[in-house]
Amino acid sequence: MSSHPQFSLVLSGGGLKGLAHVGVFRALGERGLVPSVVVGTSIGALIAAAWATGMPIEEMEDRALRVQRKDVFRVAHLDMALRRMLAPAVYRREPLDHLIASLVGDRTFPDLAHRLVVNTADLTTGQQMLWGLPGFDNVRVSDAVFASCALPGILPPRIIQGHTCMDGAVVENLPVRAALAAQAAPIIAVDVGGAGGERVGIERKGFAAVYSRGLEIVMAEMIAENLREWSTPPVVLVRPNVDRVSMFAFNRTPYLIAEGYRATHAALDALPDRLDTLPPGLHPQREVEITVDRERCVGCGVCISRSPQVFKWDDERKAKVYNPLQWWSPLGDGTIEACPTQAITAAQLWPPIRTHD
């Protein structure tokens, strides 16, 4: 890709896995791709806000590598002891407030070097609140970022202009619709939710592990639902391989940055053309040949319910592929992962044997 089109960059939440976003910015910078607006949720909002101040990528990487647990999570012992179940959150607000202030200072949105939109949700009404849009930009960036990071029950919500705001992941963890509110342009969307893959023994690792795993699953389903019927503008979906990294892991930062960098280059390398000339829908797409292992298939019908244009029942009431050659979007893998017996495979055809419509 040699062009430099206007585009929106969308960064998802995902706990500490979101440090992969730092690598995303490095990869984009190497290609000369500068987003005209960045829309972030949770840690995606935090990383985006640091970049939006004009912070060099080298400093962003250095800051990311130095973040420790105490810089984000300190148990609210006094609140928990005195208020018990009425405590606003498990963790205190002060450490994260200090970290965010060290990155963005006391700026409001118009003070930033780059345009930023921060995704939050109103705890009272359930509405999505997008700070940085016209009419919602004369507020402190640090307050909006804190609210976007405030996982329900984990960190306390933040009141902004009379709205009690919490993590926007509860309404749209990968806020592609919010990007449309900011501008009509192609979107590069980076999903670090990482719900795929099997996680053995989560139930034995305590409250935080079970809670975060549940969030990952919910957020992944929400993203898939939002994108399943997506038409326009084109969305390039970048999914770093962070499935097996905990949302609360502080010891995987070098890997996360490197994986965000790798995944961004890989997704952009797979595009057939410039961002602004891509057809509507999700990208990158690949041609695959889909098969079902009849020995493994038990006829549960999950694949048929998810992809009726690909699968149907055969005479023995097992899944049969009646359209095996598919242009597979990044969401296509969800059909494979949904099969409880792992009976479905999708072999990529290279070079493609037919022309994309």
Image: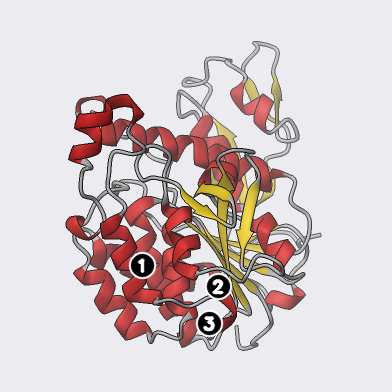
Please, what secondary structure does the residue beneath circle 3 have? Answer: loop
Q: Which residue is mark 2?
A: 268
Q: Amino acid at mark 2?
A: Leu
Q: Amino acid at mark 1?
A: Ile
Which numbered disc flags the more N-terminal residue, 1 or 3? 1
Structural distance between the alpha carbons of marks 1 and 3:
14 Å
Question: Mark 1 packing: few (<14 Cα in 10 Å), some, or many (20+)?
Answer: many
Q: Quadrant of the N terminus?
A: bottom right
Q: Are marks 1 and 3 in contact (CB under 8 Å)?
A: no
Q: Which residue is mark 1?
A: 100
Percent coordinates x, y for residue 265 in the rendering: 47, 73
Numbered disc in front, either 2 or 1: 1
In this orientation, which residue lies closer to the viewer: 228 or 206? Answer: 206
Which residue is pictured at 61% across the width and 55% down the height? 175
Which numbered disc flags the more N-terminal residue, 2 or 3? 3
Which residue is pictured at 67% across the width and 58% down the height? 178
Residue 229 sits in quarter: top right
From this viewpoint, is residue 345 visible? no
In this orientation, which residue lies closer to the viewer: 344 or 256? Answer: 256
Structural distance between the alpha carbons of marks 2 and 3:
27 Å
In the image: residue 232, left or right of residue 349: right
In the image: residue 350, left or right of residue 265: right
Q: Which residue is mark 3?
A: 112
Residue 63 sits in quarter: bottom left
In the image: residue 52, left or right of residue 207: right
Percent coordinates x, y for residue 115 in the rendering: 60, 78
Q: Quadrant of the C terminus?
A: bottom right
Q: How many marks?
A: 3
